[in-house]
Amino acid sequence: MKKIIVFLLILISNLVHSQDVVADSILSNEIRILQAKKCTHYFFLKKYSVGSNNLTATENPNCNYSFDLYLFWEDSQGIFFRKLNKCNSQPIKITTDLFVNFATKLKSIKNEKIKPYQVNPEEFSTINHSEYAEILFQFNNKISSVKLDYYTISSDKESPNINYTYNTSLPTVKWLLECDSLILNSR
């Protein structure tokens, strides 16, 4: 039994690592393309859940990875985003102020701390099936990232999150929610 558990843990670890390798490869390729175009205003949004949710229609190819990865950028023709997937989705032109004061925003979100879901000063709340987001961006010639658990920016009536107002007031969260809205409205 012990050997089976160890084997499963190694298998899960390898699957998680392989997802990171795929994402890193996609990011590296897209960054090279952006740099070749001399594009300096861009960021990536990676959204994922712990576990797996693979539903594939038999008549359509599966274009998606086990995570959602979006590229947002600004160039001389406007502001765009596109989902980075196996089917080479097309860019969507958007109207937004995501890139206004871009460097200031990046510096700000890099140093923000999102507080955990807290029911009262002594009690925290967690779940094991949350959705996560990671914003990846280049700042001072370094790739940086900010990770966020959507559960920390939620609240419910029965056990409200006392950090909800603080968390949702942070520029990182506002930026993420604006990206989510743009993605949702483009469908």
Image (cartoon, helix red, strand yellow):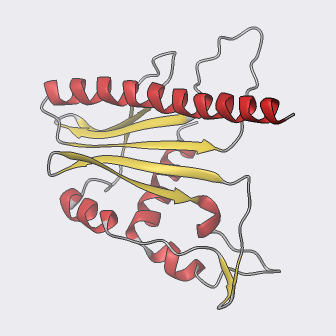
Left or right of residue 185, residue 54 in this image: right
Residue furthest out toward the front: 2
For residue 69, above or below residue 37 = below
Quadrant assignment, res 67: top right
The quarter in which the C terminus is drawn is top right
Q: Is residue 40 above or below residue 115?
A: above
Instruction: Name which quarter of the figure residue 109 lies in.
Output: bottom left
Task: Give the farthest residue toward the right.
Answer: 1
Q: Is residue 144 above or below residue 17?
A: below
Q: Position of residue 21 (x, y in %)?
A: 45, 27
Residue 9 in percent (x, y) is at: 70, 36
Q: Nearer the viewer, residue 52 or 168?
A: 52
Outermost residue on the top side: it is: 59
Numbered circles on residues, count? 0
Please provide percent x and percent y for residue 127: 74, 61
Q: Is residue 75 left or right of residue 94?
A: left
Locate residue 43, reporting x and y percent. 32, 44
- The quadrant in which the N terminus is found is top right
Name the residue at 48% across, 35% down: 69
> For this rendering, which residue is in front, 19 or 139?
19
160 w.r.t. 37: above or below: below
- Asked whether residue 53 appears in the rendered view, the answer is no
- Give whichever of 149, 19 is nearer the camera: 19
Q: Residue at x 79, y 30 (%)?
A: 3
